[in-house]
Amino acid sequence: MTDTADPNPADRLVALLDLERIEENIFRGRSPDEHLQRVFGGQVAGQALVAAGRTTDGGRPVHSLHAYFLRPGRPGVPIVYQVERVRDGRSFTTRRVVAVQQGRTIFHLTASFHRPEPGFEQQLPMPAVPGPEELPGLADELREHLGELPDALARMTRRQAFDIRYVERLRWTTEALSDAEPRSAVWMRAVGPLGDDPLVHTCALTYASDMMLLDAVRLPVEPLWGPRGFDVASLDHAMWFHRPFRADEWFLYQQESPIATGARGLARGQIYDSDGALLVSVMQEGLFRPHDAPR
């Protein structure tokens, strides 16, 4: 599909999350052929959560998910999502989802849904950062440093479903990282409206949560943009959803990495709305294998 035929990346994201129901608990998702080495993990996680949510009554929003990336998915090949209805209790609903591609399990997810109920509230404050209107968009910042963008990079920014604005200017050289801490923060929102289905917004944010969280791990050792010294792969992913939100409104994704060792790095993130309410907490571990490491 060309950019001319479908110019709105937000519409493409909604379509990507609109799974085909094959059987009562079996769904099929598209996997666009984007000429990537493997399917983007956020796509698989978002589609798996859609499959889980479509087997609930809709009155219980998801409050947590825990997932493992088991094998790389192949772009251009459909993915089948098999849902197990583990439990339907009075307050909580549990679903387990297995993603299968060409007969091989590539991913599995467990999601828990909670009937809304009252309770006390407390949270740590959102960090003080510039607002998104004060920051350049990703494409503008890249052009400022690179000049005319290579075709592949220009196409990537045009097709990006989220407007991304880094709170700190992108780190461009290894020298600039000499005292860099493993922390990063970005403002994000979908580039267009995503409709009014709360599950779509939850799954769209799940998609977005995998886009750059592991960047916090490697900030002290290599620039965000440029040649990479590591093969990077997500190993697992966990999220806790605290409050309702819209993924087509600005949210701050604050990220940090407490540790990297043994070719694995751990990252955690907090997602806030523009008023400072904590919406989502995220944890992810990734593999960081040097290109010259024995296989």
Image (spheres, helix red, strand yellow):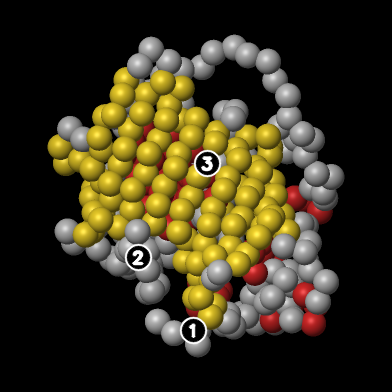
The tag on residue 181 is none
Q: Residues within 10 Å of mark 3 (few under 14, many from 20)?
A: many
Residue 245 can be seen, yes or no = yes
Work out whether 38 lies above or below 239. below
Q: Which residue is mark 1?
A: 293
Name the image quarter holding the C terminus. bottom left
Q: CA distance from mark 1 to mark 2?
A: 19 Å
Instruction: Tell me whether circle 3 and circle 1 mark residues in contact (CB < 8 Å).
Output: no
SS for callout 3: strand
Q: How many marks?
A: 3
Q: Is residue 107 above or below residue 249?
A: below
Which residue is farthest front?
Answer: 262
Query: Mark 2 and mark 1 in contact (Cβ < 8 Å)?
Result: no
Q: Is residue 190 left or right of residue 127?
A: left
Mark closest to the chain's N terminus, 1 or 2: 2
In the rendered structure, which disc, 3 or 1, sits on the residue that comes first in sequence? 3
The circle drawn on residue 239 is: 3
Residue 139 in view of the camera: no
Q: Residues within 10 Å of mark 1 (few under 14, many from 20)?
A: few
Seen at 45% across and 39% down, the residue is 65
Query: Which amino acid type is shown beneath numbered disc 1?
Result: Ala
Q: Secondary structure at mark 1?
A: loop
Measure the alpha-carbon separation of dots 3 and 1.
31 Å
Q: Is residue 20 left or right of residue 127?
A: left
Q: Where residue 104 sits in the image (x, y, percent)?
A: 21, 59
Assign the N terminus to one quadrant of the image: bottom left
Q: Position of residue 270 (x, y in %)?
A: 66, 44
Q: Which mark is residue 72?
A: 2
Amino acid on which the number 2 mark rests in the picture: Pro
250 relative to 107 in the view: left or right: right
